Image (cartoon, rainbow, N blue to C red):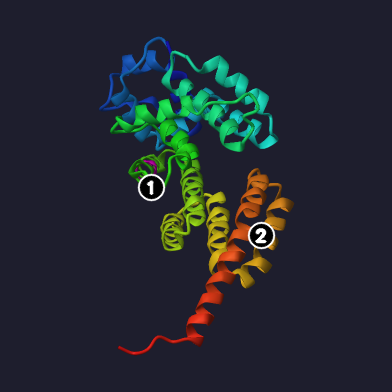
Amino acid sequence: MITYGPTIRRLRIDQHLPQKAVYTGIVSRSFYAKFEKGETNISADKLFALLQRLNIGVNEFLYQHRGMQPSATEKLRRQIRDDYQRGNFKALRAFYATNRYHALPEMRALAVTAYALVYITGHNFLHMSNAPIAEFQAVLKNTPDWTLEQARLIAETNFLIPLTDPLHHRFFRQIVKTLLAYRSYSDEIDNDLADAYLNEIQPQLLAGHLDTAARLVTELQTISADSHAIDIQFVLTFCRYLVGLYTDFPVVEKQLPDLLSWIDKLNLPFSRDYHLITEVHWDRGRNHYLRRGYFQTKNSDHPQSPN
């Protein structure tokens, strides 16, 4: 049995509050005394009411209750991202093999996340199949409301669905909807939103949908306007430069390397990814810009006859 009473007691004492100031109107004095000692538990609605008296949110309380440590699921998610950043694909494959049939849905989702990161990076040296990813996508296709972990996973793999498939657009919009619904859960959700937009802007650019990519950048700018997350500002700037490679290459070719150099100096975890993404779009963006300029010049040299 998980008992939250001792944590409530510590928080109450830290705020120099008597017991009566916390329990009055919520539970009886005797019940509260037993609760603080860890001798009994409490219903969720009454726990939330006590937290309001202590002026502390649920997420912060659980963080305090865990001894200022993230949840077990969050630790595993961070470990998966760290293994990916270090290129430890063997560990990612091992995590998938161990947890693919786990009893808990969130663990199965993390397992598919680890698998997807290996798959999409191209390290399919054992002839990896996209079947685990497709299976997960098929489940979510018929799931009206997603969990946070489900939205995060689809955000990593939605680009595997062709832009011509209506499911791609539907999934992206549900990713954004789900993440926005969880936005007050943690500041990291804004970074998840930024990554989702970055993952969506790239295939749109590769498909030549510059107007769509520019509109997505504008959406991300609106989301980031009232965000306190730092990473989202880097992602927003990077996305602007990605679009700029296609629309204003002479300017961006001078500014983007400076941004990448700055990120390298700060030793930010996404530095490697940004360099790889830039390599993908640099020549494509330049060629698109030059072709557009060529045809604009050609058309201006040979104006159409008036009707």
- Vertical side of 53 occupied by 261: above or below: below
Q: Which residue is mark 2?
A: 259
Pick the residue in front: 291 or 91. Answer: 291
Residue type pointed to by label 2: Leu
| 117 in the magenta segment | no
Q: CA distance from mark 2 to mark 1?
A: 33 Å
- Determine the main secondary structure of the stretch shown in magenta: helix
Judging from the image, what secondary structure is the residue with disc 2 in?
helix
Q: Earlier in the sequence, mark 2 or mark 1?
A: 1
Among all residues in the image, which is located at the extreme bottom? 306
Q: Which residue is mark 1?
A: 164
Expressed as whole percent of the image width and height from the top left, the position of residue 175 reads: 39, 41
Residue at the spot 65% in from the left edge and 62% down from the top edge? 256
| 173 in the magenta segment | yes
Pick the residue in front: 260 or 137. Answer: 137
Residue at the spot 41% in from the left edge and 59% down from the top edge? 212
Q: Quadrant of the C terminus?
A: bottom left
Residue at the spot 72% in from the left edge and 57% down from the top edge? 261
**In the figure, is residue 285 to the left or right of 27?**
right
**Number of other residues with Cα within 10 Å of mark 2, as a class: few under 14, some 14 to 19, many 20 or more:** some
Q: Quadrant of residue 78?
A: top right
**In the figure, is residue 238 to the left or right of 173?**
right
Residue type pointed to by label 1: Thr
- Vertical side of 263 occupied by 149: above or below: above
Expressed as whole percent of the image width and height from the top left, the position of residue 42 reads: 33, 17
* Magenta region: 171-175
